Amino acid sequence: MFNKILIANRGEIACRVIKTARKMGIQTVAIYSDADANALHVQMADEAVHIGPPPANQSYIVIDKVMAAIRSSGAQAVHPGYGFLSENPKFAEALAAEGVAFVGPPVGAIEAMGDKITSKKIAQEANVSTVPGYMGLIEDADEAVKISGEIGYPVMIKASAGGGGKGMRIAWNDAEAREGFQSSKNEAANSFGDDRIFIEKFVTQPRHIEIQVLCDTHGNGIYLGERECSIQRRNQKVIEEAPSPFLDEATRRAMGEQAVALAKAVGYASAGTVEFIVDGDKNFYFLEMNTRLQVEHPVTELITGIDLVEQMIRVAAGQPLSITQDDVQLNGWAMESRLYAEDPYRNFLPSIGRLTRYRPPVEVAAGPLLDMGKWQGEAPAGTTAVRNDTGVYEGGEISMYYDPMIAKLCTWAPTRAEAIEAMRVALDRFEVEGIGHNLPFLSAVMDHPKFVSGDMTTAFIAEEYPEGFEGVALDEGALRRIAASCAAMHRVAEIRRARVSGRMDNHERTVGSDWVVSLQGHEFALRIAADTKGASVSFADGSSLRVTGDWTPGDKLADMLVDEAPLVMKVGKISGGFRIRTRGADLKVHVRTPRQAELAKLMPEKLPPDTSKLLLCPMPGLVVKLDVEEGQEVQEGQALCTVEAMKMENILRAERKGVVAKINAAPGDSLAVDDVIMEFE
């Protein structure tokens, strides 16, 4: 076994590998760019080596720099994580030439399966059903349009060396095919150093289901069940679960056996993932094979008790698998929510900045999930587990140079419904401040009827949120629970103020019992009867709720019980009440005396400024291209400019017909959120 491993990556996956290596008694070496000098993975590793400037193409994906770090550290093996150099055959070859073990598959398998065009041809030869498409390389936009027409719209334009949604576009007509080809080509070149593009039929109403495989160098291969990855945005997975609520055992077995057969056909060794598109009749089509550890591997670990990183390291050390297919049991249900530095209220555009507050929910290992060991019988009813894979910490910076994912929150429970409920509570307990993030959206999905029923496709987000995410409108029952809790909390705060001011010896007598709570367009008149254990809150219609909890003024998190049901709220102070965030809703909750409520109705409403004649930068980023000039008339939907942020190109379009009056930015300019790019007449 190895004594020292270098992790050729950063962020949460580097931290994840370090944890398993430490458990195995293996020393670890981190690499870092200027932007990551104080990163968590650098702090966790036994030693760290600096490799260059922030841009990945000047540091993390420069093979010579990584090889120099390996030599200077004396590492015997390298785990590449995912992304960066994880599927780069030249890197694997360089390691082999140096006599350093690659914690991943052989070079031949990377070349065969890592390239999406080649992998499709091999799959066809192996009689694996594949999606119709054009397997050859495409030279220019004209050829892309021609091929797209022959295949039949809609089509998927994809980077051959792509992954993680980078270099991928859906085109529904010739214009989108032409535009998508160029954008995909640019993104592929920037992210992977390889701008080859191919096109395939886009299957409508699909489910994205993938099979985890594990093979060794002794000819053994097994599959570890499937992961449902259908909740995607811009072809980037957002929520994953294992197993899939859609598959039956026969389909699972057929997909697993095909996946293992495909892996063995190319001499695969290590952990890998075979991705399929599955239609409503459970017909499945091979998409691609990822010759690396997947982002969503934790959900497989949680339902199998198998540490995939440990297995990868053991296979790289030449050990045979100690697990057979008969040993693989799928127990319970696991969910993964990806926390992204993206603002859901701005169409999920990237956000950067300092994490002024970062408090994940407490991680909980339950029974057989301890240390991801073997299962020891069935878990008792009500048992849940919480796991958070992260690479950041409070006070750290979220950089514009790398992928916006900052954590993967996972829950496990014996059933899918329990795993979803555990995730709801965990998301509500996850505190993140200082940047835009998608926690509200993740909470909204967990409560969405389609998701709860398991009836979803990869079009879920586009279909259910066609105008983007604007927060959650809670039903009256949920609002009553929040109103009752906030009234009780406000009463506690008022008693403390009375005590501090010294208004009366009996402080509680200075605080009334009657309150009016307004939130999300609703108003509730209520009365509080408090005692030593909590408060009984009565509403004007005669209903009542019992509220208990240990919240004290200043706490950022309120963990309450309302009629014995949990209610977790993130709490901020506003004038006359609270800012409450829970279950995807962001609420201003005003708690007033009846007289204050009367006067509040007389106050004029403050209107937001008019920005209808401005093109504002929706995210921190770099202006790549301007498509219009001053004085030019533009039409609704016309491209105005392209801004690049976190390795993604974002085309900003005109919302209506108009004339460009002034352009305030030029290609190469770095912009902040809401900087004015151009003005219209």
Image (cartoon, rainbow, N blue to C red):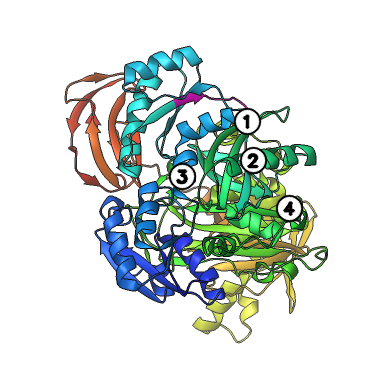
Which residue, given by chain and number where applicable, does mark 1 sit on? 128
Q: CA distance from mark 1 to mark 2?
A: 10 Å
Which residue, given by chain and number where applicable, does mark 3 sit on? 108
| Label 3 secondary element | helix
Between disc 2 and disc 3, whose residue precedes? 3
- Image depth: mark 3 or mark 4 in front: 3
88 or 505: nearer the eye? 88
Q: Is residue 555 above or below residue 521?
A: below
Say which residue appears at 58% left-offset and 58% top-offset. Answer: 409
Q: Position of residue 595 (x, y in %)?
A: 58, 58
The answer to whether marks 2 and 4 mark residues whose Cβ atoms lie closer than 8 Å is: no
Say which residue appears at 57% left-offset and 32% top-offset. Answer: 123
The answer to whether marks 4 and 1 mark residues whose Cβ atoms lie closer than 8 Å is: no
Q: Is residue 203 inside the magenta stretch? A: yes
The answer to whether marks 1 and 2 mark residues whose Cβ atoms lie closer than 8 Å is: yes
* Residue 261, label in figure: 2
- Image depth: mark 1 or mark 2 in front: 2
* Residue 325, label in figure: 4
Q: CA distance from mark 1 to mark 3?
A: 20 Å
Three-letter amino acid code at disc 3? Gly
